[in-house]
Amino acid sequence: MIAVIDYGAGNLRSVANALDAAGVSYTLASAADSLTSATQIILPGVGHFGQMMRALDDLNLRGVLIDRIEAGVPFLGICLGMQALFEGSDEAPEVSGLGIFGGRSVRFPDTVRVPHMGWNQVSRQANSKLFAVFKDDPWFYFAHSFYIPQNRATAALCEYALPYSAAVEHENIFGVQFHPEKSADSGQLLLKGFLER
């Protein structure tokens, strides 16, 4: 069963609508036992990094989420859900991320309008499993003020003032900075690729 983490905020309804459109069964998970039996896990996220991580801690989801990811369960983090995979964020320096990857999210420079909102094209990196379903570099919808710099897990790049990680992946772990649930056909195709893992 696909578990979509419900921590009381985020773009949950839009993600649920996208999964409904894909014709897949899922459950909304706000308790640890909902994740222990999940065959795939999706963490949607919008808003503030600190608030999301504190909500996960309040629900006692941090430990089981890390355990399930490390056990090889396919995981997809969306927007803040991707940033949660890292050690932290400059948005809330006192709050720890999941620490699956090293590094942290940083704010876009003042030379550009923040947040970065709207459609942008991503460039796929070689050997990306998540983007193997695309013949060309696709366009997705973004809405964020903080970004993950390019790193060893980067699966796709986007440029807004500078190149940054539009997606990351490593083995069973996937994260996207954009919102596939708001990205029309490209988003549905990407979700389909993840769901078929």
Image: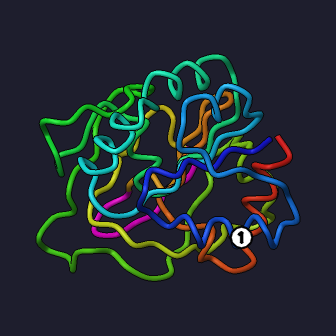
Q: Which colour scheme is used?
A: rainbow
**Quadrant in which the N terminus is drawn:** top right
Near-viewer residue (194 or 11): 11
Query: Is residue 26 located in the magenta-colored stretch of the structure?
Result: no
Q: Closest to the observer: 91 or 137?
A: 91
State the residue in front, 44 or 55.
Answer: 55
**Is 163 positioned to the left or the right of 124 in the image?**
left
Q: What is the x, y in percent for residue 51?
A: 26, 51
Check the image and report above or below for 103 versus 156.
above
Boundaries of the magenta span? 155-163
On-image quarter of the C terminus? top right
Whether residue 30 sits left or right of residue 159 in the image: it is right
Q: Is the magenta stretch mostly helix, strand or loop?
A: strand
x and y percent of residue 68 in the render?
61, 23
Q: In this view, does 43 lie to the left or right of 136?
A: left
The residue labelled by disc 1 is 18
* Residue at the spot 50% in from the left edge and 81% down from the top edge: 119
Q: Position of residue 94 (x, y in %)?
A: 12, 36
At label 1, counting other C-alpha atoms closer than 10 Å, the crowd grade (few under 14, some 14-19, many 20 or more) is many
Q: Which residue is drawn at 75% across and 69% down?
A: 188
Q: What residue type is labelled 1?
A: Ala
SS type, badge 1: helix
Q: Where is residue 156 in the image (x, y as percent from the top left)?
A: 56, 52
**Is residue 42 positioned above or below 182 on the image?**
above
Q: Quadrant of residue 74?
A: top right
User: Which residue corresponds to the image point at 39% horizontal and 30% vertical from the top-left?
Assistant: 98
Near-viewer residue (142 or 3): 3
Q: In this view, does 52 lie to the left or right of 136?
A: left
Residue 78's place in the image compared with 17, above or below, is: above
